[in-house]
Image: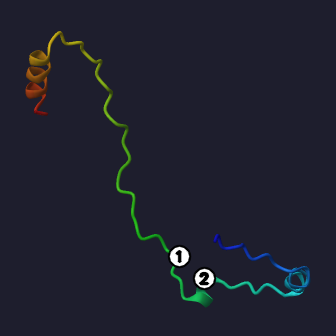
Amino acid sequence: MRPEPRYTSLPNIMKAKKKPIEKLTAEELGVDLKPRLETVKVTEPPKRQGGAKVESVDELVGKLKEAGLA
């Protein structure tokens, strides 16, 4: 048996419309809004080099070893 969703009744919707909304500030809630991170430096990533086609798996493994990836 699937649970049925609970729908709000019309009188409760009308009561909710009349209820005042209390606005609180961060200080009232005890929340500190000052930034915790500091940006030290922003740089562009290095330009990508063009890819190269290889003829065999052995050649691919050799190129990966040259690049220090294997």
Q: Quadrant of the N terminus?
A: bottom right
Instruction: Name the residue: 51% across, 81% down.
Output: 32
Where is residue 35 shown, x and y percent of the image? 47, 70
Label 1 Cα crowd, 10 Å radius (few <14 / some 14-19 / many 20+): few
Determine the CA span between mark 1 and mark 2: 7 Å
**Image vertical order of residue 18 relative to residue 54, above or below:** below
Q: Amino acid at mark 2?
A: Ala
Left or right: residue 22 versus residue 16 is: left
Instruction: Name the residue: 31% across, 32% down.
Output: 46
Q: Amino acid at mark 1?
A: Leu
Where is residue 52 shown, x and y percent of the image? 24, 14
Describe the element under mark 1 as helix, strand or loop: loop
Q: Quadrant of the C terminus?
A: top left
Question: Farthest top residue?
Answer: 55
User: For residue 33, which numbered disc appears in the image?
Assistant: 1
Residues under numbered marks 1 and 2 in contact, where contact means CB atoms less than 8 Å apart: yes
Q: Quadrant of residue 47?
A: top left
